[in-house]
């Protein structure tokens, strides 16, 4: 049994979960934030150490089931306006906004305790100084089927069919 599984099952007092969030987009530096009152220096899964700024972070994880749409809802304080500038720049550039959720144990910041959840932000909005975002995890409903499309570039013989 992993330490994280033990924490989920027994909730020991000496182990504290640290939720972290990375908001990234092409052409600009990522925003790193974590829940709690103190900034944390954590190691990503790429072995890169990154400072995460403490904020009032609220995360609602998607259910682990086979539903067609799985969404992560989160809210983070935007006191300095950095997140609003970040989202406005990404929207103006037409670049997607990526959200990466990681869980650490406060006693072990050397690596995430489970694989990161990588999602695409669907509806960023600002309300009362708070950035609220819904991010999609596995959009099964919007996924093409079959995945491989038969086009003239993929199957050159199609251009001779009428």
Image: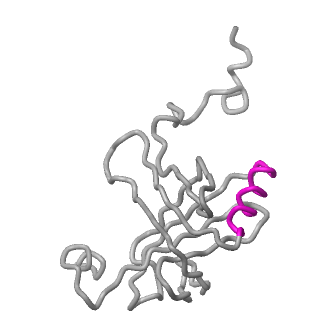
x and y percentages locating residue 97 in the rendered image: 66, 56
At 56% from the left and 57% from the top, the residue drawn is 132
| Residue ID at (65%, 72%) | 79
Query: Residue at coordinates 51% horizontally, 73% vertically from top-left?
Result: 56
> Which quadrant holds the C terminus?
top right
Magenta segment: does it hold 84?
Answer: yes
* Corner quadrant of residue 104: bottom left
Where residue 49 appears, x then y in whole percent? 60, 87
Residue range highlighted in magenta:
81-94
Main SS class of the magenta portion in the image: helix
Q: Is residue 86 magenta?
A: yes
Q: Position of residue 116 (x, y in %)?
A: 48, 68
**Residue at (47%, 48%) from the top-left corner?**
138
Task: Looking at this view, name the residue that lies furthest to the left.
Answer: 10
Which residue occupies the foreground of this view, 70 or 125?
125
On screen, residue 141 versus residue 159, left or right, reads left
Instruction: State whether residue 156 is above or below residue 75.
Output: above
């Amino acid at each position: 049994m992993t330490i994280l599984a033990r924490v989920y099952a027994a909730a020991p007092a000496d182990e504290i979960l640290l939720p972290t969030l990375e908001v990234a987009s092409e052409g600009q530096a990522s925003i790193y934030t974590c829940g709690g009152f103190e900034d944390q220096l954590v190691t990503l899964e790429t072995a890169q150490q990154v400072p995460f700024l403490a904020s009032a972070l609220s995360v609602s994880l998607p259910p682990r089931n086979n539903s067609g749409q799985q969404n992560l809802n989160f809210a983070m304080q935007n006191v300095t306006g950095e997140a609003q500038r970040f989202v406005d720049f990404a929207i103006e550039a037409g670049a997607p906004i990526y959200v990466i959720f990681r869980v650490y144990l406060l006693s072990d910041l050397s690596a995430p305790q489970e694989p990161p959840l990588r999602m695409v932000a669907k509806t960023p909005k600002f309300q009362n100084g708070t950035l609220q975002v819904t991010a999609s995890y596995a959009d099964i409903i919007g996924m093409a089927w079959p995945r491989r499309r038969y086009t003239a570039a993929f199957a050159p013989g199609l251009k001779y069919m009428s």
